[in-house]
């Protein structure tokens, strides 16, 4: 999970430095692969860390949180782009993923040490 999220953070921030359109499209493709691969891993990680009695509740909370953030991020990105430019939106998205990395680090380890 942390490797995928870290690579996502690095790729989003790296996009601000790419000026060649072909390289930019390739970087977006790699970013899409990283993000697409993360969803099932995060879901299985959630199931591994959650007590069985709370599995359905935590799954609902995860998808509800993702839906909410997916709904509010584009308008926020538009406001940032209007006020500060498109590069600032990539910094905002990179900061969001960096916060998610920090939250993932805060998840306690399981009792068996993994």
Image (tube, rainbow, N blue to C red):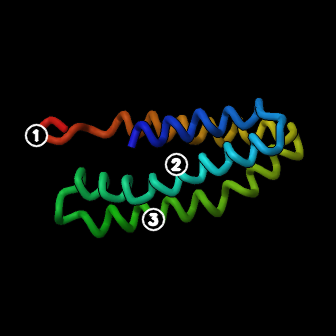
Q: Secondary structure at mark 2?
A: helix
Residue at 62% in and 37% down: 11
Identify the mark at residue 34; answer none if there is no mark.
Answer: 2
Say above or below: 75 vs 80. below
User: Closest to the observer: 95 or 44?
Assistant: 44
Residue at 52% in and 48% down: 34
Q: Position of residue 102 (x, y in %)?
A: 45, 33
Q: Earlier in the sequence, mark 3 or mark 2?
A: 2
Distance between mark 3 and mark 2 Cα atoms: 19 Å
Residues marked 3 and 2 touching at CB (< 8 Å): no
Q: Earlier in the sequence, mark 2 or mark 1?
A: 2
Q: Position of residue 104 (x, y in %)?
A: 39, 40
Q: Secondary structure at mark 3?
A: helix
Left-right relation of 67 to 38: right
User: Closest to the observer: 54 or 95?
Assistant: 95
Q: Position of residue 94 (x, y in %)?
A: 63, 37
User: Closest to the observer: 96 or 7?
Assistant: 7
Q: Secondary structure at mark 1?
A: loop
Q: Quadrant of residue 62?
A: bottom left
Q: What residue did someone put label 1 on?
A: 112
Distance between mark 1 and mark 3 Cα atoms: 27 Å
Q: Quadrant of the C terminus?
A: top left
Q: Quadrant of the N terminus?
A: top left
Residue at 36% in and 59% down: 43
Q: Earlier in the sequence, mark 1 or mark 3?
A: 3
Q: Nearer the viewer, mark 3 or mark 2?
A: 2
Residues marked 1 and 3 touching at CB (< 8 Å): no
Q: What residue did someone put label 3 on?
A: 63
């Amino acid at each position: 999970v942390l490797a995928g999220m870290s690579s996502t953070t690095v790729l989003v921030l790296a996009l601000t430095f790419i000026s060649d359109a072909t390289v930019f499209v390739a970087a977006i493709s790699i970013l899409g692969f990283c993000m697409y691969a993360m969803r099932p891993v995060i879901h299985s990680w959630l199931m591994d860390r959650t007590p069985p009695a709370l599995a359905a509740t935590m799954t609902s909370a995860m998808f509800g949180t993702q839906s909410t953030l997916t709904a509010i991020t584009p308008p926020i990105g538009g406001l940032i782009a209007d006020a500060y430019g498109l590069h600032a939106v990539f910094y905002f998205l990179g900061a969001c993923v960096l916060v998610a990395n920090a939250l993932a680090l805060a998840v306690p380890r399981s009792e068996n040490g993994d």
